[in-house]
Image: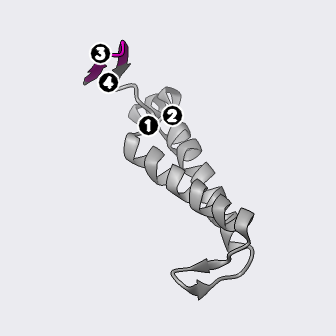
């Protein structure tokens, strides 16, 4: 699949070699934004319920870990070992 934005001259190849999918990236950015906002504002609540102060750090780490894990699990070397 090739995503073309010819009006601004951007071509993005979303072929089989994509290691991080757009949905994973968006969820990751959501976790990173939510965790960092809670840390910076020191507002330790989720939907009005208080949480421990370490919870925003865990949310931030999950947001960072999602693309790293997706990149690692979809690496070509790992896929070659699974096929053998």
Instruction: Look at the numbered discs 1 and 2 and tell me whether their residues touch, using CB distance below 8 Å.
Output: yes
Mark sitting earlier along the chain (1/4): 4
Mark 3, secondary structure of its residue: loop
Q: What residue is at 56 percent from the left and 46 percent from the top?
A: 69
The magenta region covers 2-11
Is most of the magenta stretch helix, strand or loop?
A: strand
Above or below residue 61? Residue 4 is above
> Of circles 3 and 4, which is in front?
3
Q: Specify whether residue 6 is painted magenta.
A: yes
Q: Residue furthest left?
A: 1
Residue placed under numbered mark 2 in the picture: 78
Looking at the image, residue 68 sits to the left or right of residue 76; the answer is: right
Residue placed under numbered mark 1 in the picture: 82
Quarter holding the C terminus?
A: top left
Mark sitting earlier along the chain (1/3): 3
Looking at the image, residue 37 sits to the left or right of residue 84; the answer is: right
Local crowd at mark 1 within 10 Å, few (<14), some, or many (≥20)?
few
Above or below residue 84? Residue 38 is below
Q: Nearer the viewer, residue 52 or 84?
A: 52
Q: What residue is at 36 percent from the left and 16 percent from the top?
A: 8
> Of circles 1 and 3, which is in front?
3
> Of circles 1 and 2, which is in front?
2
Residue placed under numbered mark 3 in the picture: 7
Looking at the image, residue 7 sits to the left or right of residue 24; the answer is: left
Q: Specify whether residue 82 is painted magenta.
A: no
Q: CA distance from mark 1 to mark 2?
A: 6 Å
Q: CA distance from mark 1 to mark 4?
A: 21 Å
Residue placed under numbered mark 4 in the picture: 15
Local crowd at mark 2 within 10 Å, few (<14), some, or many (≥20)?
few
């Amino acid at each position: 699949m090739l995503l073309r934005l010819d009006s601004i001259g951007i071509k993005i190849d979303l072929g089989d070699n994509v290691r991080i999918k757009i949905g994973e990236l968006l969820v990751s950015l959501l976790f990173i934004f939510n965790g960092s906002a809670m840390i910076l504002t020191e507002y330790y609540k989720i939907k009005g319920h208080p949480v421990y102060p370490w919870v925003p750090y865990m949310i931030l780490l999950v947001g960072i870990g999602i693309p790293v894990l997706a990149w690692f699990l979809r690496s070509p070397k790992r896929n070659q070992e699974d096929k053998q």
